[in-house]
Amino acid sequence: MFTAEYSMNLAWFILLGILLTGYGVLDGFDLGVGILHPVAKTDEERRIIINSIGPLWDGNEVWLVTFAGALFAAFPDVYALAFSSFYTNLMIILFALIFRAVSIEFRSKHKAVIWRQFWDGCFFLSSISATFLFGYIVGQLFLGLPIDAQLELHKEKMSFIELYPVVTGLLAIATCAMHGSIFLYLKTEGELQERIHNWMWHTYGIFIMVYIMTTIFTLTQIPSATANLTRYPWLWSVVMVNVLAIGNIPRAVFLKRPGYAFLSSIATIAALAALFGIAIFPNFIVSSIDPGLSLNIYNSAASKGTLKTMLLIAVLGLPFVISYTVIVYWVFHGKVKLGKFSY
């Protein structure tokens, strides 16, 4: 039954999805640039690649911080259980994101080849490891966690060598690499841009292969993933958007319309995030011991007063975050030019 309490909880579920999607879209190409960084041939090309995200990367991560804060405020039990369940993974992600920032800032502080190669390696490894672990966590959430009625996690029942989370981790890498290559094409010119044009085709081909493999694994190993699509047929429109966006990327690249390819890549990531939300709704964390013990938007939410107050703050604050993002991207749009104060 549709009630005011249900609508409040649903609004927070959607808001968290928007924040997570915003992070995926914005930091997705950011991480993808880091994954593709070793493909550059010269030091100047590596500098151009880093400077393509130089003014943007820290603003992109604001969306992740906002998501974590909103999750803590609206669904504290989910926040606590998720962080305790994936503590090691999240700590590695945290250090990876820190090292990415340090690598960007420190790389150009010294001209020694070894110095720059070291920080280039840190930049690449931090980018690919953070991306993989984000996807790995999504895969684990799909499979569920062994939690009981007391919200105790039985780690002895968790398997860390299951194939499905590894596949979703690889999908995250392939998606970000494709997204990042299209972004780099928009930001570069000349010989480097011509090579990046080939990278776009290669990364797209890899993405398609991993995407198909992930879809097959999801449908065979997690039949419940399509339950809400059956219950609410109009949600198939999200699947259609996903398919059309993926199909439009090579079309736009072939027609030499990289802007449309980038928009299609954004739509692809947004649709994938929406499909993840559709698949797990109304749950946040599924119990692999007993689905009835899962944490969902009802039994894990903060008090009604807290949700209402925080929603008001979010409605007032989110436009500022979006405005800041739009302004920064507008100011730093165009091709990358190396200058005196470039990285």
Image (spheres, helix red, strand yellow):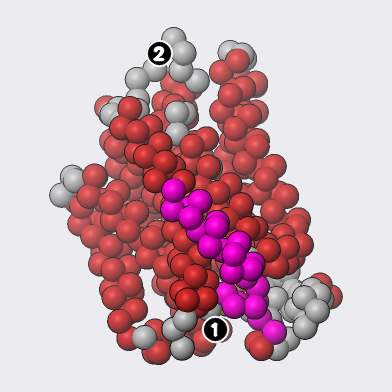
In the rendered image, residue 312 lying in the magenta stretch gets the answer: yes
Q: Residue at x 70, y 76 (%)?
A: 145
> Residue 112 sits in which quadrant?
top right
Q: Residue at x 39, y 89 (%)?
A: 230
Binning the other alpha carbons within 10 Å of mark 2 as few (below 14), some (14 to 19) or many (20 upward) gives few
- Viewer-nearest residue: 257 or 90: 90
Name the amino acid type tagged 1: Ile
The residue under label 1 is: 222
In the rendered image, residue 301 lying in the magenta stretch gets the answer: yes
- Viewer-nearest residue: 114 or 320: 320
Name the amino acid type tagged 2: Gly
The magenta region covers 293-316
Residue 125 image point, x, y percent? 62, 42
Q: Residue at x 59, y 32 (%)?
A: 101
Residue 87 image point, x, y percent? 75, 57
Residue 206, can we see it? no
Residue at the far front in the pictured view: 305
Residue at the far left in the pictured view: 255
Does label 2 or label 1 sit earlier along the sequence? 1
Q: Which mark is residue 339?
A: 2
